[in-house]
Image (spheres, rainbow, N blue to C red):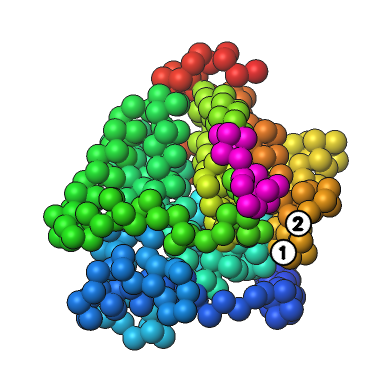
Amino acid sequence: MTQGAARTAGQVASVVGLAVAVALFLSVAAVRHGFFDMQVYYGALTWWVHDGGEIYDYLRPFTQYGFTYPPFAALAMLPMAYLPWTAAIAVSVSATVAVTALVFHWMIDPISRRAGWTRWYALAVALCLAAAYEPMRETVNFGQVNMLLLFLVAVDLLRLLPRGSRWAGVGIGLATAIKLTPGIFIVYLLVTRRWRAAFTAMGAAAGATLLAAALFPDASREFWTEALWNTSRVGELAFVSNQSLQGVVARLNPQEPSTLVWLVLVVATLALWVWRSRRAAAAGDEAAGLALTGAVMCLVSPVTWVHHLVWLLPALILLVDNATAAPAGGRRRRALLAAAVVAYALLISRIVWAWEKDFTGLDGFLGSNTYVWISLAVLAFLPLRHDSTTAGSARDPSGVPQLGEVDRGTPAGERHGVGRPDAVR
């Protein structure tokens, strides 16, 4: 057997072994939700399309849960109403896997080249690890749209914006029209002074929203005047699955959570995010901008269920990327790999659920908010790439700088109009 064939055989064997280990782990750790959220979407769309009801009047039987997304999301999901239930599940799972593979390919490719791994091997390992990641498995088991939204945003920040494409912002705009929370990426474009992309995103969001309003005026009127403000349809803020700053405050006093304390925490968190995002943009580190904004979105949103934390995946990948770019055997590499391993281990462990029934006391405060602490650590400490090219990085054949690489030919601040080349040190 040739050396190349032996290497391929070893990689195949290791991927198979990892897949089996993950499957065994999931058989014990994964909670089956029966595509609960997708049942809400499917039921609401069926009620709306086939039974003549108003989509925002629908509640899943024996629950308070109804369709909470904007009307453009209903338009995007409309084909679901014409599919059998099992086919709708197949489409949902397949779409999630496909877009996850694409985002991972974009972000992991520099790591695989630096480590000398083949692309398929790095991607296969990453997908196996993602399958064990609690927010990802919850996304799949609930039938959620989180990875589709992350994909739309990543297209802009990782592919179009670095190339200066005039279409940069369209993905963020569409994601915002589907679900309001990705709108913080429009704010990211504004605070980092990417004016054209920001206005493109606002135009795309407005255009998609107006299209839905023209097609479904009654549903649009009901959403923007009533359903949007009906917080009882979302769920209990103190529930341990709510891993946002609002969830932390609500668990301190579930009967009367302090709005003032929450607002102070949100303002402080946003201030930190603005500072770090501007530094990332000045350094040309769009991937860090994606990771930082995903983390702050989870923190400041009133409700961040565990499955929403797929937005932390870019940060975990960047920790590994930064670690492999650091000198071998150095303290920095060890620290970054340790941070990635610890964060990943906690985020697959279901640790917060140990305090589902009782989150009082110091242990309850620390343990029930574990994922919030991880999000805060990402926001505060995720490494940013600076002007110098990282050792071992390379360019894509297209000439686009990869994650962890800043083009030496043009200072980062001049490329994006953010700050000066020496502004980030």
Percent x, y of residue 269: 60, 32
Image point 31% across, 82% down: which residue? 83
Query: For the view shown, which residue lies furthest in the left direction?
Result: 214
Q: Which residues are magenta?
A: 249-263
- Type of amino acid at the residue the image marks with label 2: Phe
Q: Is residue 196 visible?
A: yes
In the image, taking residue 358 as reference, residue 56 lies left or right, namely left
Residue 140, placed above or below residue 175: below
Percent x, y of residue 158: 46, 43
In reply to whether residue 101 is colored magenta, the answer given is no
Q: Nearer the viewer, residue 82 or 168?
A: 82
> Can you identify the residue that label 2 sits on?
359
| Main secondary structure type of the part rendered in magenta | helix
Q: Nearer the viewer, residue 319 or 210?
A: 210
Percent x, y of residue 197: 33, 34
In the image, taking residue 330 as reference, residue 174 lies left or right, namely left
- Type of amino acid at the residue the image marks with label 1: Glu
Query: For the view shown, which residue lies furthest in the front direction?
Result: 255
Image point 65% across, 18% down: which residue? 425
Image point 44% across, 39% down: which residue? 184
Count of residue discs:
2
CB contact under 8 Å: marks 1 and 2: yes
Q: CA distance from mark 1 to mark 2?
A: 7 Å
Q: Nearer the viewer, residue 394 or 31?
A: 31
Q: Which element is circle 2 on?
A: loop
Image point 47% across, 66% down: which residue? 144
Tell me the crowding category of disc 2: few under 14, some 14 to 19, or many 20 or more residues within 10 angstroms, Cα based: many
> Can you identify the residue that label 1 sits on?
356
